[in-house]
Amino acid sequence: MVERGDGVRLEYEVVEKKNYNYENVDMTEVMRVKGGDEGLNLITCTGNWVKDRKTFDTRAIIFTRRV
């Protein structure tokens, strides 16, 4: 659930989870809504720390749809 600044609450459910190598994230797919007309996709870092790049080696994407 996400609450907007005006107090309206929007509810979402997870429809898919995917991991990508940090160098190969398909942003076209990441921005696509899956399973409905409205969605909220979350992107975070996970995996192993890549010291010379100062980042983790995996991007976890959580695809949701509004319910």
Image (cartoon, helix red, strand yellow):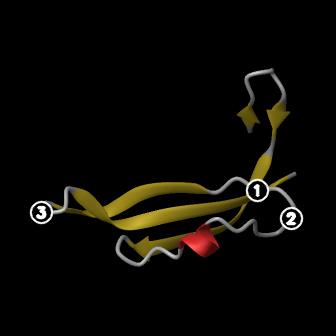
As drawn, is 60 to the left or to the right of 53? right
Vertical placement of residue 7 versus 18, above or below: above
Q: Position of residue 40 (x, y in %)?
A: 70, 53
Q: Amino acid at mark 2?
A: Gly
**Mark 1 in CB contact with mark 2 (< 8 angstroms):** yes
Depth order, front residue of 39/16: 39
Residue 39's disc number = 1
Residue 65's disc number = none
Secondary structure found at label 2: loop
First reached walking from the N terminus: tag 1 or tag 3: 1
Residue 36's disc number = 2
Q: Amino acid at mark 3?
A: Asp
Q: Amino acid at mark 1?
A: Gly
Q: Residue at x 80, y 21 (%)?
A: 6
**Mark 2 in CB contact with mark 3 (< 8 angstroms):** no
Q: Position of residue 26 (x, y in %)?
A: 52, 76
Secondary structure found at label 1: loop
How crowded pointer 3 is (Cα within 10 Å; few <14, some 14-19, many 20+) is rated as few
Vertical placement of residue 13 versus 2, above or below: below
**Mark 1 in CB contact with mark 3 (< 8 angstroms):** no
Snapshot quadrant of residue 61: bottom right
Label 1 – label 2 distance at C-alpha: 7 Å
Residue 52's disc number = 3
Q: Residue at x 55, y 70 (%)?
A: 27
